[in-house]
Image (cartoon, helix red, strand yellow):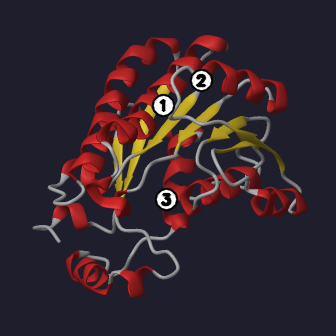
Amino acid sequence: MGSDMGEFAGKNALITGTSGPLGAAIARGLAAAGARVALHYRGSEPRALAQEIRTAGGICAPVQADISREGFAPGLMTEVIDLIGPVDILVNCAADQALKGDTTPFASLLATNTIAAEALMRQVAEVVPRAGIAIVNISSLEASRAAPGHARYAASKAALESLTRSMAAELGPKGIRVNAVAPGLIARPGLENDWPEGVARWRTACPLGRLGTPKDVAAAVMFLASPKAAWITGTVLMVDGGTHSGPGW
């Protein structure tokens, strides 16, 4: 599913949540394939990521916004357009994470994981509406599986998948595609030390026998954002090593 060098040349991409490993991997991939990328962040500016992209010859612009705040989207979109131009690719990757469990207030999870994504989808479609825009939302395997202890997070991602389907139907006549990627457990530094039993259960349940990587997710996003997926919309692509097809983990 990888993208060819230069496949996204001339395209402008906004990726939310680039301070995290998934958002960073997606930004790297799109920039390497020629896209100009807006690196959204809420707290810590991704300076190292921006420098890495520029050193490799890519074009990027960090942009800050608290997407949990009501009414953030018009200002963010205006700034992005000023920095890189009208958005051709939107990747809603920013999220309050499941690792916090159900200690995060439900309203906060919904604001970041669901409501912000919907606001940005509408901004992209309304500010400079044109055919060919591709939107990819980052969901989770937990959106479609029972998730004890992560019920709020799972519900926020299930709502995002519902939005993906509805917005695909709503925006399709305008030539705008909306899809989602639902990752399984993604490796990160320290995960096996922090949660050894969970990682072991995952490896047992996963037909491909390993955890995912941020590059696995980035490859799926780039496919859905590319012309190769020109007749795909309203779809949730599972990127979980086949775990969704098993009895559970």
Q: Amino acid at mark 1?
A: Ala
Q: Which residue is mark 3?
A: 217
Image: 50 above or below 121: below
What SS does tag 1 mark? Answer: helix
Q: Is residue 124 visible?
A: no
Label 3, label 1: how many angstroms apart (C-alpha)? 21 Å
Q: Which residue is mark 1?
A: 116
Q: Position of residue 166 (x, y in %)?
A: 32, 22
Q: Which residue is mark 2?
A: 73
Q: Quadrant of residue 120?
A: top right
Q: Position of residue 18 (x, y in %)?
A: 63, 52
- Label 3 near label 2: C-beta < 8 Å? no
Of the numbered discs 2 and 3, the one sitting upstream in the chain is 2
Depth check, mark 2 against mark 3: the one in front is: 2
Q: Amino acid at mark 3?
A: Val
Q: Residues within 10 Å of mark 3 (few under 14, many from 20)?
A: many
What SS does tag 3 mark? Answer: helix
Q: Is residue 164 visible?
A: yes
Image: 245 above or below 12: below
Q: Residues within 10 Å of mark 2 (few under 14, many from 20)?
A: many
Label 2, label 3: how many angstroms apart (C-alpha)? 25 Å
Label 1, label 2: how many angstroms apart (C-alpha)? 8 Å
